[in-house]
Amino acid sequence: MLAFRISRAINPTGRVLPFAEAWGAVFTGGKVRYGQNNQTQTTSFDYITRSTQNRPRDYIRYIQVCAERSLEKNNETITPDVVKAQDKAFSNYLKSELQDEIHGAIPEIKDVFTIFTELRKQTLSIGEFKEQYNLAVKSGRLPKRDVSFILEILFMFSVIGNVPKQSTFQVFKYTNPDARLNFNEKICVHRGLFKALQIL
């Protein structure tokens, strides 16, 4: 799917390129450096994947914002620096997309997202979220709802995932469709939302 979209963008009437060839035609080689003192590095594809929910439209949007920036810089291909720099633009897109998707179930979803901005934590306990949520209800910023329902919806749309005890991986609905929110474990915010929610 992604290789097809990239191939058509390169040449609307040309052949569909193998994925590696299509990706290499758009992105230059080299690693994206990130983390403390930029000591961690990964490929452009893996860096982008960390911010998406593995949906084709997520990749397409990330490529679009990178391409727009590259054109502004008169670059013919997308460099690792551009991929890293456009993380915030994609994060804002993902936040907006999820707000639109969740709005039907939680009309005040924008204000619910603000809770994560106030806490400024990538990983937190259910208790921390509930405490901040109840403060927002008390101040009149949020209507009183069942907090468990709010958390279930956030998990369903992969805004949050679980962090199993004694484990280095995270459980998100988009990677494990059968997963259910475990209220006995800590929760984590999807990495793609960090910049938009001002967690990073």
Image (spheres, rainbow, N blue to C red):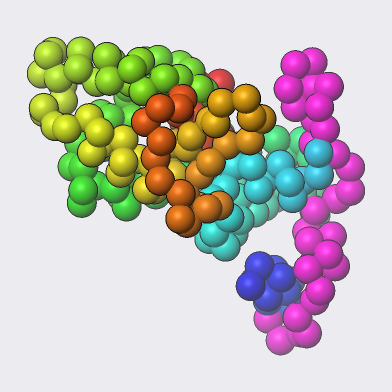
Which one is in front, 23 or 175?
A: 175
Region rendered in magenta: 12-41
Tag count in the figure?
0
**x and y percent of residue 151 in the render?**
31, 35
Q: Is residue 155 left or right of residue 192?
A: left
Which one is in front, 129 or 77?
A: 129
Residue drawn 75% across and 81% down?
A: 16
**x and y percent of residue 130 in the render?**
27, 20
Which one is in front, 100 or 106?
A: 106
Name the outermost residue toward the right. Answer: 29
User: Image quarter for residue 90?
Assistant: top right
Q: Is residue 98 magenta?
A: no
User: Image quarter for residue 2?
Assistant: bottom right
| Residue 18 visible, this angle | yes
Residue drawn 11% across and 28% down?
A: 143
| Residue 79 visible, this angle | no
The quadrant the N terminus occupies is: bottom right
Residue drawn 46% across and 25% down?
A: 186
Residue drawn 82% across and 33% down?
A: 41
Q: Is residue 14 magenta?
A: yes
Compared to residue 115, the image places residue 160 above or below, namely below
